[in-house]
């Protein structure tokens, strides 16, 4: 063994996105900046101001560098935001006020700069003008950089990542994930998180191998260490030896062979051995994922999470901007269906860039989220509804509301929709008068009243990610209790069964669009319980299709019926896994 080789160690986390990656670590740590306050010696005043100016110069160099990289890698539009950042740095008022504050108070320059910048941010935040409010976000971002530089702390931004690296982070927010540079991040490892946190869903869509819930790995590795990420098993090997790399090379080849078998099968119909067709659709977050979904032979889009249009934006996208996007997706899939979900902001998808929309909450998952937020902001909601309705003239668009908790919300949302329709009629715009409207079933109270909700919509889509978290009281993003997040819990299976039965009595179809739909082990349970279609992240489609083609619906029904008689989630899981393994061989 090479004596310079650091010792290998293995960390077990939670498998979040399949695949194997090997490379150097890019440590991405987000910490709250603490700005120390102290008095500066009067004879050090000139030096202090020079330090401030040097901090501004370094910040300018950094931003220019990022701007050039982004321009090269992503294009001029994406790079434009950094022009706005450079303008903040050149704002004379900000600089002279900081110096004036320093001269009057004698406090260190970071403290003075921070207090002036905070005053500016607050003032811009309060102005009733979208363009000026955006400036608040720019100032906030630039101020953080300047402070990091003055305090001598390295600030990392994921979009800065330009070379191929494995990102090791304490946490990755959905906006971090949405801004990730796909060609540079070859693997993702996070201390916290679980299979269904939104950042992970994004990683899966981008086909980046990911392992989450590794607790304190960020304190045990340094940038430049080498790690191997096994997204299949949820394992991270730090400083792997040659033998380990060789072993993983073989595993990777086997998996690749199996995956290419899956891709070949994915061109065939999604039909069980006893001839039942199972529609398999894709979950997408951005227009450009439509191509990948089609490549994986999705029969449409079962969930278009529109909040990602809002998440990385410093403004609320208006009707026209949204219409162009929905129309593009509708046209890409026509005549296949596209289910557009209305805005689901809040929870673990806060809108940090638009101050004032969502306030700090102690319990965001039980807070001002999704349909609750939309019903409180009917004008914003209607912009989206009009955009969706108009896109329905260009394909087979369906629409659904997230986080419906009972019939009142559903009927209120439908009333806003009726207003949006009326406005479009007055404007003479075209739209599909018969566009189907559905309700997500992801809150236990909705599941318990499915028979009532069924009278006010045309389809259901079960969001198992949230449904499980609310049924079992397990935070879907908390790694400490991730082992208790059990999709095979009898409460989950009984609830799905009840929703399906109620829906079918009212002749409504039921889809499942949570992550459970993309794990083949659960496929026979869901289909056996009577679920009509499954929607999942595009990379999961080939494996689910392969399995659908390898099983009989009659066997799936029998498995589900048996599962309903069992009380132990682990036993139910074991039966489902056995069912899978008996039909699908990985080598
Ligand atoms: C769900 O909750 O299962 C779902 C599909 O919605 P999201 O993951 O976006 O909350
Ligand atoms: Mg949900």
Image: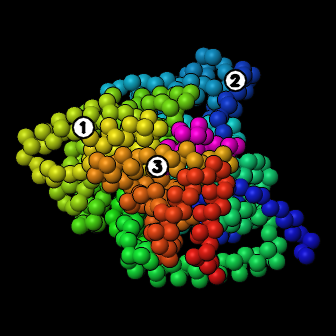
* Disc with the residue nearer the chain's start (1 vs 3): 1
Magenta region's main secondary structure? helix
Q: Residue furthest top?
A: 104
Residue 384 magenta? no
- The one of 206 and 562 positioned closer to us in this rendering: 562
Numbered circle sitting on residue 37: 2
Q: Position of residue 207 (x, y in %)?
A: 53, 66
Q: Are marks 2 and 1 in contact (CB under 8 Å)?
A: no
- Secondary structure type for disc 3: helix
Q: Visible in this render: residue 543? A: yes
Read off the residue under disc 1: 414
Residue 473 magenta? yes
* Disc with the residue nearer the chain's start (2 vs 1): 2
Q: Is residue 15 left or right of residue 428?
A: right
Q: Quadrant of residue 415?
A: top left
Read off the residue under disc 3: 496
Q: Quadrant of residue 225?
A: bottom right
Query: Disc 2 and disc 1: Cα gap in Å?
Result: 54 Å
- Secondary structure type for disc 1: helix
């Amino acid at each position: 063994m090479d004596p310079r080789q650091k010792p290998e160690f293995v960390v077990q986390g939670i498998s979040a996105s399949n695949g194997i990656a090997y490379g150097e670590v890019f440590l991405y740590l987000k910490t709250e900046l603490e700005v120390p306050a102290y008095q500066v010696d009067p004879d050090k005043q000139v030096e202090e101001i020079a330090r401030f100016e040097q901090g501004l110069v370094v910040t300018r160099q950094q931003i220019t560098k990022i701007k050039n990289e982004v321009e090269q890698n992503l294009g001029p539009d994406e790079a434009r935001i950094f022009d706005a950042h450079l303008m903040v740095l050149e704002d004379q008022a900000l600089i002279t006020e900081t110096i004036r504050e320093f001269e009057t108070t004698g406090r260190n320059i970071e403290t003075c700069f921070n207090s002036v910048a905070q005053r500016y941010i607050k003032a811009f935040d309060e102005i009733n003008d979208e363009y000026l409010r955006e400036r608040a976000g720019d100032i906030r971002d630039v101020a953080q950089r300047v402070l990091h530089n003055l305090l001598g702390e390295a600030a990392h931004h994921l979009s800065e990542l330009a070379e191929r690296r494995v990102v090791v982070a304490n946490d990755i927010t959905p906006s971090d994930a949405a801004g990730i540079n796909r060609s540079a991040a070859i693997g993702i490892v996070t201390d916290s998180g679980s299979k269904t946190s939104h950042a992970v869903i994004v990683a899966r869509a981008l086909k980046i191998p990911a392992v989450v819930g590794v607790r304190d790995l960020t304190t045990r590795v340094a940038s430049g260490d080498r790690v191997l990420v096994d997204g299949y098993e949820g394992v991270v090997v730090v400083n792997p030896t040659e033998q380990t790399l060789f072993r993983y090379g073989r595993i990777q080849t086997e998996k690749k062979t199996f995956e290419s078998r899956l891709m070949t099968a994915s061109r065939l119909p999604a039909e069980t051995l006893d001839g039942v067709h199972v529609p398999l659709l894709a979950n997408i977050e951005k227009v450009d994922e439509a191509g990948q979904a089609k490549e994986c032979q999705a029969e449409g889009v079962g969930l278009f999470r529109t909040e990602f249009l809002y998440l990385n934006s410093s403004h609320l996208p208006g009707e026209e901007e949204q219409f162009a996007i929905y129309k593009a997706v509708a046209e890409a899939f026509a005549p296949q269906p596209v289910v557009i979900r209305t805005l689901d902001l809040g929870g673990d998808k806060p809108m940090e860039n638009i101050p004032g929309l969502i306030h700090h909450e102690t319990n965001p998952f039980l807070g001002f989220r999704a349909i609750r937020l939309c019903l409180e902001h009917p004008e914003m909601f209607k912009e989206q509804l009009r955009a969706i309705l108009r896109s329905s003239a260009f394909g087979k668009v369906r629409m659904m509301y997230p986080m419906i908790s009972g019939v009142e919300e559903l009927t209120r949302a439908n009333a806003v929709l009726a207003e949006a329709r009326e406005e479009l009629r007055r404007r003479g715009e075209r739209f599909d008068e018969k566009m189907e409207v559905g309700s997500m079933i992801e809150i236990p109270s909705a599941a318990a009243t499915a028979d009532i909700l069924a009278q006010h919509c045309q389809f259901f889509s079960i969001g198992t990610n949230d449904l499980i978290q609310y049924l079992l009281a397990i935070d879907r993003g908390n790694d400490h209790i991730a082992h208790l997040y059990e999709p095979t819990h009898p409460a989950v299976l009984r609830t799905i069964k009840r929703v399906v039965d109620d829906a079918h009595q009212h002749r409504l179809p039921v889809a499942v669009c949570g992550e459970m739909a993309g794990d083949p082990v659960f496929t026979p349970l869901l289909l056996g319980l009577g679920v009509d279609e499954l929607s999942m992240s595009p990379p999961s489609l080939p494996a689910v299709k392969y399995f659908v083609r390898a099983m009989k619906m009659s066997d799936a029904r029998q498995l589900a019926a048996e599962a309903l008689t069992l009380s132990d989630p682990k036993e139910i899981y074991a039966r489902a896994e056995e069912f899978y393994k008996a039909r699908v061989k990985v080598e």
